[in-house]
Image: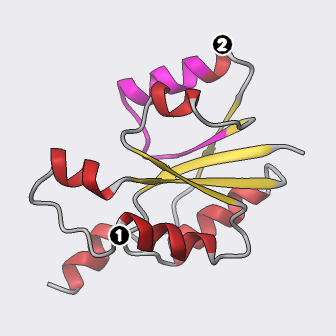
């Protein structure tokens, strides 16, 4: 059984997230969704508007049949990867920069596959937040 891992905040759970999870399942049998700790978000982005607590976001994700396991992380990076048992790392096409390069290098060194998945056009958490302001 292959396990795929994807990261996110998942505060405004929407169709784009569901389609991300469906793409993940095309690459593996078992989907692990890592959700960012709300306390960590508020610590480093005090002005961030987080609608749901970490526990609430975990509960929503665990309720989805497509999701096999939910874990909580503080920050995306190699430290988070080292703590999770997975075979494939799913990154979005917008996940670019040094920390994602480090994660990709770590995966290559440790025999993990990395897949790049497409965003759902026209669906973005930031845009959804703006509509509710």
- Secondary structure of residue under mark 1: helix
**Outermost residue to the bottom:** 132
119 on left or right of 114: left
Q: Residue at x 16, y 61 (%)?
A: 48
116 on left or right of 119: right
Alpha carbon of mark 1 to alpha carbon of mark 2: how far?
33 Å
Q: Residue at x 26, y 54 (%)?
A: 39
Question: Vertical placement of 121 versus 99: above or below?
Answer: below
Q: Residue at x 30, y 58 (%)?
A: 38
Question: Vertical placement of 3 versus 14: above or below?
Answer: above
Q: Is residue 105 magenta?
A: yes
Task: Report the disc number at residue 109.
Answer: 2
The residue to which callout 1 is attached is 125
**Residue closest to the eye, 23 or 69:** 69
Mark positioned earlier in the residue sequence (1 or 2): 2
Task: Report the disc number at residue 11.
Answer: none
Q: Quadrant of the N terminus?
A: top right
Mark 1 touches mark 2? (CB < 8 Å): no
Q: Position of residue 35 (x, y in %)?
A: 47, 56
Instruction: Classify residue 114 by image quadrant.
Output: top right
**Outermost residue to the front:** 55
Image: magenta residue range: 89-106
Q: Position of residue 24 (x, y in %)?
A: 70, 55
């Amino acid at each position: 059984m292959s396990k795929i891992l994807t990261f996110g905040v998942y505060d405004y759970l929407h169709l784009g997230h569901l389609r991300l999870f469906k793409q993940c399942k095309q690459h593996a049998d078992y989907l692990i969704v890592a959700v960012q700790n709300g306390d960590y978000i508020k610590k480093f982005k005090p002005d961030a508007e987080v609608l749901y607590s970490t526990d609430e976001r975990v509960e929503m994700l665990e309720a989805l049949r497509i999701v096999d396991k939910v874990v909580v992380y503080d920050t995306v990076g190699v430290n988070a990867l080292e703590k999770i048992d997975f075979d494939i790392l799913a990154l979005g096409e917008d996940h670019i920069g040094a920390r994602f390069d480090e994660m990709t290098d770590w995966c290559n060194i440790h025999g993990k596959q990395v897949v790049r998945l497409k965003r759902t056009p026209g669906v973005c958490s930031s845009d959804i937040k703006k509509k509710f302001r």
